[in-house]
Structure formats: structure tokens, C-alpha cells
Image (cartoon, rainbow, N blue to C red):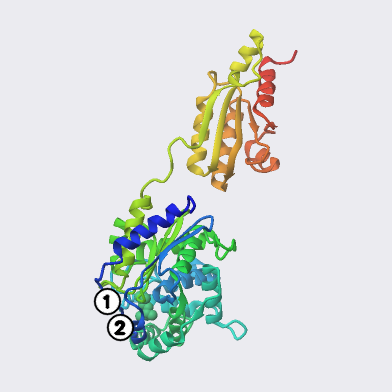
Amino acid sequence: MSASEAVTDALRELHARFAGVREGRQADYIPELTRSDPDDFGLALVSMDGHSYSAGAADTPFTLQSVSKPFVYALALASLGLDEVSRWVGAEPSGEAFNAISLEPGTGRPANAMVNAGAIVTTALVPDSREQPAFGRILTCLSRFAGRKLDVDEDVHGSEAATGDRNRALAYLIRSTGTLPVDPVAAVDTYFRQCAVRATAVDLAVMAATLAYGGVNPVTGERVVSPEVAAQVLAVMATCGMYDSSGDWLLRVGLPAKSGVSGGLLAAGPARFGLAAYSPLLDASGTSVRGHAALGALSERLGLHLMKNPALPGSTVTLVTTADVLPSAPSGRLARALHERVGVVAAQGALDFTAAERVLYALDESGSEDADPVILDLREVTGADSDALALLHAGLSRLAREGRRAAVVDPGDRLGPPDLVRERTGQDLPRFGSREEAAEQCARAVAGPG
Ligand code: GLU
């Protein structure tokens, strides 16, 4: 037993709650998919530290089907960039079924990469060469997202290849528009193969977690795609990932997600979790019934809805005061008065734009006179992104211009390399190892020479 088993317990509870749901039916237009066990039901969650939790049939392999689409879209984006990919496949919800014949009038461009027509184009766009065939690149990419080598279920591939005329028809239609520089008809078999790649619910949770973690697989530590590509994929999943129920899903569950007709379903809580479910009984729009219910309940229980503000109020600035509260405050009247005029602001945790704004506001709040010096203590700050740093530098630069002296306690260089800080703030910001040292220096500066 261990404390973190409580997370597993939460999954087990959901599993028990929905395992008895018998609604829905297996997809049968790919005959081989009816061989899955309708009772199978697995749930998995992977954290941003790569911790993995699961319940039920989370290690049962099934084929990715449409769950492959966002990841192949990621590969196309990483290879060609958003502008080029967007010339050939859009990013608008189609409001139609996954296999709808929805091509933009005039251009023939599929609505988005999550419906079959768009996914076939996306697959066709993946670079294909003799040394590196497109499917090899796709399988490698899917495997890096999952953090292990995935393989193809040849029976499911054969079954779809034998019956997939509708997808071929879509590809012919796309080709008939004559604009695509690559052949969508030739890409259909590669598309069938990517749909037949086998994975488990735990794999899906790792794949979702990799998108949620800005493109770095939190289990292997490998960067799979850039943060920009991960964000682009999540955005399209949020608006188009659940076919014609995407709007309702975003409204109720509030997470970028993707479902597939074999019963796999994954959802990403950006910067939080990767979640996945597997259960082959599908609703009318092709999404796992139990998976939908379980991920919906989990999102509600853990407060994962994207539109709920995750920032904890007041968690950045831990102290706004004057230096006279420091243990080393001097006792002499003059020295003490000088010390009283030195403001101290301490911050903690990871700084993003929101947190940096709090820090700057606290700097303004500290000190009674405009010209009083202030100490910014960053020792408990664990990191700062580039937007937060730029804002902090700009704020410190304003202080300097207004004649307010600032000093930082920043042994870990959280504020960035001194050269950059000098360039951005227009001053040599004094840095100290402790608040006491900084306070003494500031008080001396207030007292002036002598
Ligand atoms: N291979 C399936 C198809 O193209 C994938 C569809 C899905 O999972 O929604 O029909």
C-alpha cells in the first residue's frame, strides 16, 4: 500500500461505476473489430512526472484507429509546418460524422485532420522516400509518443484494407480536385496501417500526456515534437477530436480528446495529465460509451475542465514586507529606520505570465515611498518561462527608470543570465545570496556615503 494508490483507487471507483454499462455496440464495418471482447474496460492516467495509474483492462492491446490521427497530424506539422499543412487540410469542425464526405466547396480541402478525409490527406503529406518510407516514419513517431515500440495488427489491417472502399472513395474524390501535390489514393493503405497500430490504454495515456507536456514524453523524457506542434494538435483535438459531438464534449468534459472506432479514447489535460480509456462498445458517433462516461466523470472529479481557471490565487508571492522584520535587522534608531524603508518581496514556484504580473504588483505594493529600495527574493522560484522573464525584466527596467533601486536574491539565476538582465533592465541589478545581505546593502545605499 502507498499514498499514491489513492489515485488508482479513484480510477478503480470509476471503473466499477461504469463497468456494468452495456449500451452501445462494437464497430462492425471493419469485420475484425467485432472480435474484441465487449466486456473489456480499461482506464489509465499518466502524470506530468511520468507516474502511471490504471484500472481494469489497461494493458489489453487494441488498434488505434482514429486515435492515430492527431499524432500523424503532429508528424505532418513537425515535417512541413502549420502554414503548409493548412493549405491542404483545414482546422474547422465539420459537425459531421468521421467518414463524412466533407470537402470544402471550391478547393476540395477536408475540414480538419480528425475526420477521415483530412486524416488521409495528412498521411499523404508525411514525407515518403525510399530510405525513409512514410509508414516507417509514422510508426516511429507513434512509438515515440507511446514511449515503446508499437506494432501493427495485421488481421485488422487486412480486414480494413478488404472493406475500406468508402475511404478509398474519399481519396479518389480528393484526388479529383487535382490540387494536392501528393497522391491521397496511394496514401490510403498507409492510413489503414496507421489505424491498425496496436496499443493499450496505458500507451494512450502516455501519448496524451506527451501532448499535455508540451511534446516531451514524461515517461521517457524524450522530446517528440516541439511545444508549438503539441499546442496546435491539442487545439484541433479540442475543436474537432470528437467528430460531430466535439462541441458537446468540450462543453461538458472540457478537454482536448480523440476517440477511435475500436473503443480507444484519450484526453489531455494540458500541463496536468494524459488520460485514456478502452472499451469497444460505441455510441452513435463512434465513441466508446464507457470511456466517454468515465473520462467525463474523471474530468469533473479532478476539476480538469480547460475553461476552469487552474491558477491558485495568491500562490506566487509569499511575502510583501519591509526589511526590518529580517532576523538581522539592526537595533540603532537610524539604522532601523533605514531598514524599515527597504521593501522585501518573496516569490515561489514556477513563474508564468500570470505569476510574473503578481510579482510586479507586489513590488509596487512594497515600500512606503516611491524611491524606497526593494529586494526581490527569488530563492523559492523553481523556474520561469520566457514570457514571465520578459515581463519581469520590463518591470524592473521601469523601476530603474523611475529611480527605485532594486536588488535580487537569486543564487539560482532564475532571472536569467546577468548579461541578458543588464540588456533588458538597463542596469547591473545587484544580486545577493541572502535577504540580509541585500537589505544591508540597500539600507547603506539609502543612507548615502559616510
Ligand atoms: N480506420 C477507421 C476508418 O477509417 C478509423 C475511424 C475511426 O476510428 O473513427 O474508418
Q: Quadrant of the C terminus?
A: top right
SS at mark 1 in the image:
loop
Q: Nearer the viewer, residue 240 or 81?
A: 240
Badge 1 vs badge 2, beta-carbon distance below 8 Å: yes
Identified by mark 2, the residue type is Asp
Distance from Cα at disc 1 to Cα at disc 2: 9 Å
Q: Nearer the viewer, residue 94 or 147?
A: 147
Identified by mark 1, the residue type is Arg
Q: Quadrant of residue 115?
A: bottom left
Disc 1: CA contacts within 10 A as few (<14), some (14-19) or many (>=20): some
Q: Write down which quadrant ligand 1 falls in.
A: bottom left
| Residue 90 seen in this snapshot | yes
Find residue 169 and report its horizontal and vertical position in percent: 34, 87
Q: Nearer the viewer, residue 115 or 182?
A: 115
SS at mark 2 in the image:
loop
| Residue 107 seen in this snapshot | no
Disc 2: CA contacts within 10 A as few (<14), some (14-19) or many (>=20): few
Find residue 326 and report its horizontal and vertical position in percent: 61, 21
Residue most toward the top? 333
Find residue 20 and report its horizontal and vertical position in percent: 27, 67
- Residue underneath mark 2: 28
- Tell me which residue sits at (43%, 57%) in the image: 8
Q: Check the image and report above or below for 273 versus 60.
A: above
- Residue underneath mark 1: 25
Answer left or right for 108 relative to 79.
left
Find residue 174 and report its horizontal and vertical position in percent: 38, 82
- Tell me which residue sits at (43%, 52%) in the image: 6
Q: Quadrant of residue 238?
A: bottom left
Which disc, if any, is residue 308?
none
Q: Quadrant of residue 443?
A: top right
